[in-house]
Image (spheres, rainbow, N blue to C red):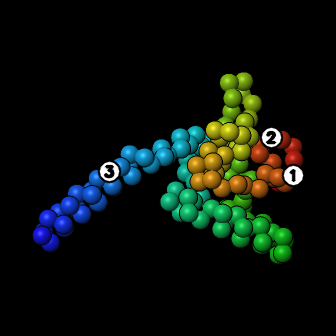
């Protein structure tokens, strides 16, 4: 009896895992970047970029220190895309680098309420 129950439970678990994988949302299609490599490995950036940007913001605002290595300006310059006419497309436009991941993760981004979304916008960053 116990063996039958165990086998049934295992079959249901395997079926549940297969069903869950089948229903998983597809990963976003991230546009390629302009640079050769990011300032940190991809797995680090995926998990830690917000902490890096927050830390950078705190150091800039409170200590008047600007670290070029983890700057938002650098992110935008590398991750901006160009349309067919050669004009820059804002990184937060639908389907673009930042917007694509944030939409997938259902996370709002408020960086660009103040910061420029393209490197050639003329706004101070």
Instruction: Name the spot of residue 75 as percent of width and height, x first.
Output: 68, 52
The quarter of the picture where the N terminus appears is: bottom left
Q: Are there few (<14), some (14-19), or many (20+) residues within 10 Å of tag 2?
A: few
Q: Residue furthest front?
A: 1
Instruction: Name the spot of residue 106 as percent of width and height, x first.
Output: 63, 53
Residue 20 lies left or right of residue 124; in this view the side is left
Front-lying residue, 100 or 18: 18
Q: Secondary structure at mark 3?
A: helix
- Residue 124: image tag: 1
> Residue at coordinates 33% horizontally, 55% vertically from top-left?
16
> How far apart are the alpha carbons under marks 3 and 2?
47 Å
> How far apart are the alpha carbons under marks 2 and 1?
10 Å
Q: Residue furthest top?
A: 85
In the rendered image, is residue 41 in sight? no
Instruction: Name the spot of residue 57 as percent of width and height, x first.
Output: 77, 67
Q: Are marks 1 and 3 in contact (CB under 8 Å)?
A: no
Residue 8 lies left or right of residue 18; in this view the side is left
> Residue at coordinates 66% horizontally, 46% vertically from top-left?
99
> Residue at coordinates 66% horizontally, 63% vertically from top-left?
50
Q: Are there few (<14), some (14-19), or many (20+) residues within 10 Å of tag 1?
A: few
Residue named by callout 2: 120
Residue 105 lies left or right of residue 89; in this view the side is left
In the rendered image, is residue 115 in sight? yes
The quarter of the picture where the C terminus appears is: bottom right
- Residue 18: image tag: 3
Instruction: Name the spot of residue 58 as percent of width and height, x first.
Output: 78, 72
Q: Residue furthest bottom?
A: 63
- Residue 63: image tag: none
């Amino acid at each position: 009896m116990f063996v039958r129950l165990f086998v049934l439970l295992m079959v249901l678990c395997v079926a549940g895992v297969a069903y869950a994988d089948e229903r998983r949302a597809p990963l976003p299609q991230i546009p390629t970047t302009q640079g050769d490599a990011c300032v940190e490995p991809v797995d680090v950036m995926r998990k830690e970029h917000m902490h890096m940007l927050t830390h950078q913001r705190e150091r800039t605002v409170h200590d008047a220190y600007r670290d070029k290595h983890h700057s938002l300006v650098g992110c935008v310059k590398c991750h901006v895309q160009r349309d067919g006419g050669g004009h820059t497309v804002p990184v937060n436009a639908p389907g673009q680098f930042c917007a694509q991941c944030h939409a997938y993760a259902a996370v709002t981004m408020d960086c660009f309420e103040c910061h420029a979304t393209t490197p050639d916008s003329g706004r101070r960053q």
